[in-house]
Image: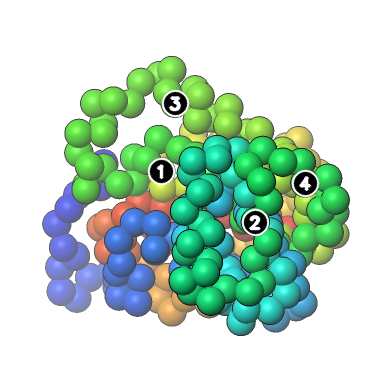
Amino acid sequence: MMPRTATPTGSRPRIRDLAMAGAAVLAVVAGASAAYAQKVGVTSAVNPASHAGGKTLALAALMDNKGQVFATDADRARLAPIFERLKRNGVRNVQVREAGAPLDDLKGRMDAVLIDAPCTGTGVWRRRPDAKWRLTDRALAERLGEQTALLSDAARYVKPGGRLVYVTCSLLPDENADQIAAFLADHADFIAVPPAEVAAPVPGLADAALVSGGGLVLSPRRTGTDGFFISVLRRS
């Protein structure tokens, strides 16, 4: 767990523009990656684990309410709040697919695919310290299995030249760098986008975040945020 103390004056810069709580930070960073890809023609994106839709809203906004974002989740209850959130925010470029519905028609068509992966949540322990006592080897194994399956499935929707964005609110290498390494070993048609390129749209992020296994690690100490991992993979 990262320390909760503030960064001393004059030390490593913090990401003040991202000094928001929890998932909002992740939405900005993951969305920035999609926005960067938009410069080379992103008109379609899919979020296969959209939950209540926070990251989907960020993607829709960063695409200027244009193009098409497809959102779904395996859990109907988690997906339910997205409809009201989309309506309240005037979002017009998101198509919500029914929970668990097949996405075969999107295979090989997406400019960007965002995986908001289920994880142990170790990155938010500073706000939920009791959660550390509920983490078991079995729970970790379940999350790892879900992440592996999501990565493999999501890869099918990325078109040549498109990007797969993988994000967690975990600081465990097992869920982050190790997952990316395993995915790349099994998918020779994907490469990791250099972390400096991923960080470029967010001022100060490249200096503050840690580079780990083809991705970026944000933490309370270094970036003034919860703990997150972000990796962007490009399909050749």
Q: CA distance from mark 4 to mark 2?
A: 11 Å
Which comes before the other along the chain, label 1 or label 2? 2
Residue type at numbered disc 3:
Leu
Which comes before the other along the chain, label 3 or label 1? 3
Which comes before the other along the chain, label 4 or label 3? 4
Q: CA distance from mark 4 to mark 3?
A: 27 Å
Q: Which dot marks residue 170? A: 1
Q: Which dot marks residue 135? A: none
Q: CA distance from mark 1 to mark 2?
A: 27 Å
Q: CA distance from mark 1 to mark 4?
A: 27 Å
- Left or right: residue 169 versus residue 63 is left
- Left or right: residue 222 versus residue 27 is left
Closer mark to the observer between disc 1 and disc 2: 2
Closer mark to the observer between disc 1 and disc 4: 4
- Quick one: SS at disc 2? strand
- Quarter holding residue 9: bottom left
Residue 134 location (% of width, % of height): 28, 25
- Residue at 76 percent across and 41 percent down: it is 102
**In the rendered image, which residue does mark 3 sit on?**
140
- Quick one: SS at disc 4? loop
Residue 182 location (% of width, % of height): 65, 35
